[in-house]
Amino acid sequence: MQTSTGKPLAAAAAVALAALLTACTAPAAPPTLAAPAAPAAPAAPAGIDQIGAAAGCPRPALQIDAADLRQADCRTARGHYTLVTFTTERGQRDWLELAQMYGGAYLVGERWVVVSTPPLLEGVRAQLGGRIESAHHH
């Protein structure tokens, strides 16, 4: 009998048996008394103040402070930004779907969005990362 790739099953079984025997005959690792290392915590998404600082706005004016998102207004000598942070990725996706119906440019990061003009978003992106998305009004 042959597999769909044309190799005999006996050869595949021999390879599997060799791997199994090697694993079974390998010496066991000595026991250790040290506790296993805890997995690294994921980096927290940027907050309103961090995003505002990247935009040159050290004290963004908070407009919405809800359970699922925070939104702030940021006005600088360079221009105007709207900063939004989200508690969930789903909330961010839903917000973006609605907002993009109105057009505009969005710098999108991990559970945060900055709304402004593309040149201003490039400056924030250089500091925070993210991707710029543009939407046209329908």
Image (cartoon, rainbow, N blue to C red):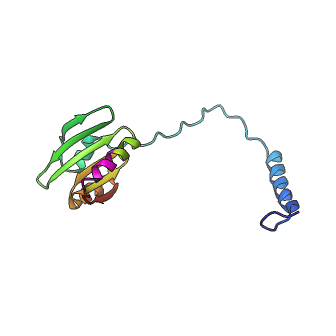
Residue 123 among magenta residues: no
**Residue 93 appears left or right of 75:** right
Q: Nearer the viewer, residue 99 or 120?
A: 99
Residue 46 visible:
yes
Q: How many marks?
A: 0
Q: Is residue 11 above or below residue 100?
A: below
- Residue at the left extreme? 77
Q: Is residue 75 above or below residue 70?
A: below
Q: Nearer the viewer, residue 114 or 58?
A: 114
- Residue 101 pos. (x, y %): 28, 53
Q: Considering the image in quadrants, where does the N terminus appear?
A: bottom right
- Chief SS of the magenta region: helix
- Residue at the front extreme? 138
Q: Residue at x 30, y 48 (%)?
A: 98
Q: Magenta span covers which residues? A: 95-103
Q: Is residue 59 above or below residue 130?
A: above
**Residue 38 appears left or right of 9:** left
Q: Residue at x 21, y 61 (%)?
A: 119
- Residue 10 pos. (x, y %): 88, 60
Residue 100 among magenta residues: yes
- Residue 104 pos. (x, y %): 24, 56
**Residue 128 appears left or right of 13:** left
Q: Considering the image in quadrants, where does the C terminus appear?
A: bottom left
